[in-house]
Amino acid sequence: MTIAVRPTTIAGDLFDLRTLEALRAQLDGDLITPERPEYDKARQVQDIAVDRYPLAIVRAASARDVAAAVQVAAAHALPLAVRGGGHSLARLSMADDALVIDLSAMRGISIDPETRIARVQGGVTSGDLAGPAGEHGLALTTGDTATVGFGGLASGGGLGFMARKYGMTIDNLLSAQVVTAAGEIVTASPNEHPDLFWAIRGGGGNFGVITEFTLRLAEVPQILGGVLLLPATREVLRGYLEYTATAPDELSTIANLMLGAPFPYTPEEWYGKPVVMVIVCWSGDLEAGERAIAPLRALAEPIADTIAPGPYSSIYDWTAHQEVRHSFSLRSMYANELSDAALDAALEAIANASSPYSLIHLRGLGGALNRVMPDATAYAHRHQRYMYTIIGLWMDADEDPEPHSAWTLSLWEKVRHEGDGVYVNFLQNEGPERVRDAYPPATYARLREIKRRYDPTNLFRLNQNISPAG
Ligand SMILES: Cc1cc2nc3c(=O)[nH]c(=O)nc-3n(C[C@H](O)[C@H](O)[C@H](O)COP(=O)(O)OP(=O)(O)OC[C@H]3O[C@@H](n4cnc5c(N)ncnc54)[C@H](O)[C@@H]3O)c2cc1C
């Protein structure tokens, strides 16, 4: 057994270890400290480049546990990190010397099929919900990867596989249980703490720890889902963009411009060659779906076509490779228009990719996403048509990140002038100006005002931070 020992440990005068023992005694869950064998596994997150040594990890079992941890962190001015599914792109859910609230054991789900209301605990992942909801012919639009946590996903907005039909994940949120910086357990809803309810729908982890989400599910007995693999040309990319932002709402898609990967459906001659992997999710009548997907199939002779009827949960089969731990350098933007130059630059970049896994991820938006008033939630990007994300990706923790980051930044410099804002959940550590890009000025000002009321000391600052100081 190896016990992880950090090269430097927290200075004894900063924190009385007896306080940790007192915290442990209060918990319904567990407190994992460095001498425990589980510590090394517990400090692991999705990103293989994260190798951090927290002071202790509260493996919470209840909102009370979360409140106790928040109170201890506040009382002792400890850095406080919150870990849901552990997929933070900015590597914010695990930190050296921090007290970490780990929600991964809070995975309870209850579904009322009559009212279509689901209550899910703060550590639930998209994949956790998809199966049980599907047993009732129900589904929620969540992210593209089963292992992404609701906590981070939904507090930033939640851009999912049925976004054009049912909006962001938060557009289906009825209320939430939140542990505030004061250590209070409150309900945020249109009637209780309405400002907090507005802020947690897009404001990221700035306002508290969400320990339970109450959501309205949609009736989705079956989808047409799968992959359409197309040759990578400017015409295919242009045709994809033009169609997907205006297609029927039931059609949500993601297009990954990438090098052909050895998936079972990829013909061998396409391994390592530029392709467009369109992941298709149609959530309406199946015959109408075939008609709606036809224009995508007509963009070029498909290299592979796996689209077939199935339960909503089957959509995650096509992104299972994304669940494997990896690391990346990422830049992302929304755009209303994308020039041919931006598409050509992407094609050129992928032909010279930094690794076989690097990709450019395009999404057509529109539909229900854009019919919500921009001031209705803190997620305010309600007019853009596209998302353009550059991901220089590597799979080996010992690999030098530099070539991947140079690749990402080189393409980014060519296209960023076409951007119009960014999704807060698709930011890395890019500085306060980029956090401001995630919100229109009026939204940012309101978020800061609410932050001042709910978290005046900025206890929740290991996130895309909205500082109360301004
Ligand atoms: C492979 C991959 C695929 C992705 N696909 C999508 C996608 O399709 N759509 C999309 O919208 N996003 C997507 N994302 C981005 C994702 O939504 C964010 O990275 C999100 O923060 C991850 O949430 P998490 O709980 O897994 O992460 P964590 O690393 O656990 O948390 C990230 C941050 O969220 C906050 N947080 C976490 N839990 C809570 C909570 N319960 N209450 C309050 N704050 C909390 C904290 O500030 C924390 O630092 C993807 C990310 C990855 C790595």
Image (cartoon, rainbow, N blue to C red):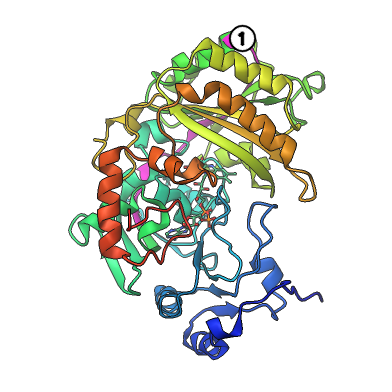
Q: Which residues are magenta?
A: 214-234
Q: Position of residue 319 (x, y in %)?
A: 62, 39
Q: Position of residue 184 (x, y in %)?
A: 31, 74
Residue 247 in the image: above or below residue 372: above
In the shown orientation, is residue 21 left or right of residue 358? left
Query: Is residue 115 shown to the viewer in this render?
Result: no
Residue 379 in the image: above or below residue 383: below
Q: Position of residue 88 (x, y in %)?
A: 55, 51
Residue beneath the point at 54% across and 59% down: 93
Residue 232 in magenta? yes
Residue beneath the point at 46% across and 21% down: 418
- Taking depth in this image into account, of 140 and 45 the one nearest to the observer is 45
Query: Is residue 305 shown to the viewer in this render?
Result: yes
Residue beneath the point at 35% across and 75% down: 183
Residue 293 in the image: above or below residue 57: above
Q: Which residue is mark 1?
A: 300
